[in-house]
Amino acid sequence: MALRYALLAALHKHPATGYELTQRFRTRLTHVWNASHQQIYRELARLDSDQLVVAEAVVQQARPDKKRYQLTIAGKHALEAWLNRPHPLPAQRDPLQVKLIAGDLLTPEALAESLASLREECVATLGYYRVIEHAYFRQTGDASMAHRFQHLALRRGMLDLEATLTWLDEAASVLDQHEPGTATASATAGAGNVVRKPITAQSR
C-alpha cells in the first residue's frame, strides 16, 4: 500500500491542509499509517502534480498562505478503484521473530530483554490508542457509518496489540523453563564445539 491512498482516504470526506493531515496521522489515524510530515508534504505535491488533488490557497494574516487540499474527480476515482481491489495481508518482517528462529543461540536473559522491550512498547501504544478511542469514539450509538468504520480500524489495532501481549505471556512461560544465567542447549553446545588452534611460537 502506498501513502497516497492513505492520504486520499483521509481527504475523501473533508479538505485539509498538510498540517491538519499530519495531525490526523499522529492522532486518530496513527494506527493506520505511520508517516512523517515531510513524507506527507512530498506525497501531497505528487498527488497535486498527478491531478488527484487540488490545492486552494488560504490567506493568513501576518503568516504565509497555506494550502488546503481536496480530492478531484480523478482522485476520487483512483481511491474507489483502489478500495475495490483485494488486498492481501502485509508482508511480515519482524526482527523479533527472526531472533526466535535462532533463539537457541541466545541466553534466556537476552531474549527476555527483547520481549520486555516489545511489551513496554505495546503497553504504551495500547494506552495511546485508548486515549484516542476516548477522545474521538466515545459516542457510537448515533455515529455515522464513516465514523464507525474509523473506530473499527482503531479496534483492529488495539486487538492486535492485546493479542501480542497475550503471546508475550506465553513466551515468558517458555523462558521460565530455563535457569537464569545459562545459555540454551544449542548455544552451550555450539560454544563447546569451537575448534581452537594451539598457540605456537609462529602464531605469537
Image (tube, rainbow, N blue to C red):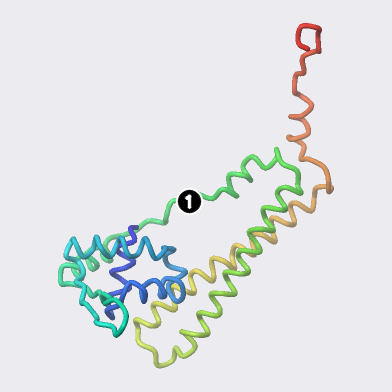
* Residue 53 point in image, percent of width and height: 21, 69
Give the image location of residue 145, x and y in percent: 35, 83
Residue drawn at the location 76% of the way across and 49% of the way down: 109
Residue farthest along the front direction in this orientation: 62
On screen, 144 above or below 97?
Answer: below
Horizontal arrangement in the rendering, residue 23 relative to residue 84 (left or right): right
Q: In the shown orientation, is residue 204 left or right of residue 49?
A: right
Q: Is residue 15 above or below residue 187?
A: below
Q: Residue at x 57, y 66 (%)?
A: 161
Pointer 1 residue: 92
Indicate the position of residue 89 as horizontal and vertical percent values.
Answer: 41, 56
Q: Amino acid at mark 1?
A: Gln
Q: Examine the rendered structure and indicate whether residue 53 appears above or below residue 197.
A: below
In the rendered image, which quarter contains the N terminus? bottom left
Secondary structure under the numbered disc 1 in the rendered image:
loop
129 relative to 84 in the view: left or right: right
- Please tell me whether residue 98 is drawn above or below residue 68 in the rendered image: above
Between 16 and 62, the one nearer to me in the picture: 62
Nearest the viewer among 3 and 190 is: 3
Q: Depth check: 128 or 168 in front?
A: 128
Image spot of residue 101 (x, y percent): 61, 42
At horizontal 21% and vertical 65% (from top left) the residue drawn is: 48
In the picture, which quadrant includes the C terminus?
top right
